[in-house]
Amino acid sequence: MAYFLADTDFERFRTLIYDASGITFSTTNRSILESRLKERLREKNLVKIGDYHELLLNDKEELKYLLDSVTTNLTRFFRNQPHFDALINHVLPEVLKTKKAANSTKIKIWSAGCSTGEEPYTLAMILKDKLPPSFTAEIIASDISLKSLMVGKSGFYPDSRIVGVPDAYLSRFFERKNNGYQVRDELMKMIRFDYHNLKNDSGLRQVDILFCRNVLIYFDEAAQKAVIDRFWEAMSPRSFLFIGHSESLFGMKTRFEFLKTDWACLYQKNT
């Protein structure tokens, strides 16, 4: 196969991306990185790949743009329904029990790697529907893709993206507009969209429920371990972690406990 990048250049760029984000490019997905680099060279009117590498070293905004372009933003409302069934039937009752014992009425949720917002809005709908009236919820939705975050912040989704939202929720939480649906203000007010690179500490603490699904697959083992350790520090003493159904902490030296419910498997922090 003929490559656009020389092997030495491929190593330089994948090392730079890994150091900046923890995202790993292997030889099997080299073509994705090469196509994104070609696009950026055209956009910046550059001919030499070395000039673009130099630009990345000196321009943090351009580095953010490249990291944005190499991430995959596949998501949908109510993706992997068993996770939400476990949330409703097991996790929320446990969290409410803990909060009541501590005389607290606020639940904090983090949707890490939220992409275009379907996951945090799904969580907001469930919480609006299931939480007792005396409780409030704060949802922090973060991603490394600025483009995706802007979609989430807008709260507008075309018809094709609404598939999976139950009719009762659609009529209650969305307003029909043009060729799509606009999320109503009552949900939008629950969510704070924020740029965050999982390579760094988020600064969040006392998170009760954390969703980070289908993100760890982009990291190697060392980067995964570092992310999971930062999640531990961000979470409250009795809290719950959801990762993707194809992801696992098995074999990783971590303090999270594996939890198998009747609906789905997840992890818990119990200190």
Image (cartoon, grey):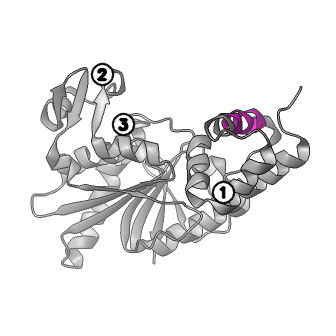
Q: Is residue 263 visible?
A: no
- The residue that label 2 is drawn on is 159
Mark 2, other Cα within 10 Å: few <14 / some 14–19 / many ≥20 = few
Magenta stretch prevailing secondary structure: helix
User: x%, y% of residue 195?
Assistant: 44, 57
CA–CA distance in space, label 3 to label 1: 25 Å
Q: Secondary structure at mark 1?
A: loop
Residue at x 74%, y 36% (from the top left corner): 34
Callout 3 touching callout 1 (CB < 8 Å): no
| Tag of residue 225 | none
- The residue that label 1 is drawn on is 250
CA–CA distance in space, label 3 to label 2: 15 Å
| Tag of residue 78 | 3
- State which mark lies toward you, 3 or 1: 3
Residue 108: within the magenta?
no
Q: Quadrant of the N terminus?
A: top right
Q: Is residue 182 above or below residue 99?
A: above
Residue 72 sits in which quadrant? top right
Q: Is residue 253 visible?
A: yes
Magenta range is: 29-38
User: x%, y% of residue 228?
Assistant: 58, 64
Q: Is residue 37 above or below residue 12?
A: above
The three-letter amino acid code for the residue at tag 3 is Phe
CA–CA distance in space, label 2 to label 1: 39 Å
Which of disc 1 and disc 2 is earlier in sequence? 2
Q: Is residue 82 above or below residue 120?
A: above
Q: Is residue 38 left or right of residue 201?
A: right
Residue at x 72%, y 63% (from the top left corner): 222
